Amino acid sequence: MRKVHGKQVSFLVKNRRVPARDSAQGLHRSSNAALALALLLAASSPPIITPAKVLRARFKAVSAGASPRAPVGEKGKTAFDGGRALAHVRRLVEFGPRPAGSKELAEARKYIVGELKSYGLKVSEDEFTAKTPAGDRRMVNVTAELPGEADDFLIVASHYDTKPFKEFRFVGANDGGSSTGALIELARALAAAPRPRLSYRFVFFDGEEAFCREWDECGKPGAPDNTYGSRHYVERLRQTGELKRLRALVLLDMIGYEKLEMGRDEMSTPWMAEAVWRAARELGYDRQFADRTEGVGGDDHEPFLKAGVPSLDIIQLNSYPYWHTPEDTLDKISARSLQAIGDVLLASLPRIEKRLKDEGKTGIGRQGDGETGRCGE
């Protein structure tokens, strides 16, 4: 991207000591009373709700317009686990710098694919050769599919490459790592949930980063030095005729900083940003999802916007002090920040689905101006 200036409670009825002087009749009455008390407690206690049932109720309620609350499973935990997401980020960072075409990125990709398959998702790899200022580079987009009630689908995406630097070691814990770790965990949470209304694709883009130092430094008309994977993905959707079934894109990028504070990307589809930010407010994440704009200037959502697909970029760029520096390391990433992202996504995605269903395939969410790629309301 370019920088622009329920806890589960069990009830226990303890055995009472009966004095020796109690008669057999008194003991019988005491036993009956204890039994009656136990039956009363059992009848009045709420049933234990499994995570799947909670998620089903959550998705149905929000789809009907209820106020969003993050799906809650056992012991009050949401379906999304920020600690698990952080563990994925840690594993990715351990591979080292992961620029497009590198063996380290290939190892990271193998890890991502293995995780996604372990959740029972259908995973595919789309290999292509990109012409870059550094020569031809082999790139691979990864897609995991979650079938829904409809064939139309919604994409949640992240880039998983890191920017190449010769002058220092760049592991991209936040820029490339945090969003990838969060997307892996989101895929797990949604794969374990009830069948969604729309189908989902979890897409990991290769080649988001520019090979030259600056975002626009080496680009040519029609051939920018960035967003290689996302531009290739849109073109493939056109070729296969699937673009007409793509209803929206939610892009994650740089979302793990311990001091997470993001504004609304100015290029993104306004109604999608409003749906997510409203959910964040209702969940108490006002500080992380700030009421301001975020000047990004370009990211993997841009090719989709230009294709007329409603798109949202969730990103902290302007207030992240370690962007494209050797200090973008694991110690800057927080499980709490990743948890906030997961909670808000699980609360807002059903609302986005409902909006898309209500407006239909030719509704306002499908309109773009074809130039800036910004979709209007």
Image: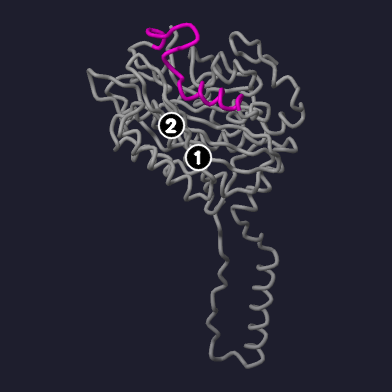
Placement of 259 over or under 67, stated as above or below = above
Look at label 1 and name its amino acid: Ser
Distance of mark 1 from mark 2, alpha carbons? 10 Å
Residue under label 1, please give it: 124
Placement of 221 over or under 262, stated as above or below = above
**Which residue is at a point 64% across and 39% down the rendered structure image?**
199
The reply to whether dot 1 and dot 2 touch (C-beta < 8 Å) is: no
Residue 238: x %, y % from top left: 61, 24
Q: Is residue 234 magenta?
A: yes
Q: Is residue 94 magenta?
A: no
* Farthest left residue in view: 167
Left or right of 37 on screen, residue 258: left
Q: Nearer the viewer, residue 33 or 347?
A: 347
Q: How is the image coloured?
A: one colour
Residue 372: x %, y % from top left: 58, 9
Left or right of 306 on screen, residue 101: left
Residue under label 2, please give it: 140
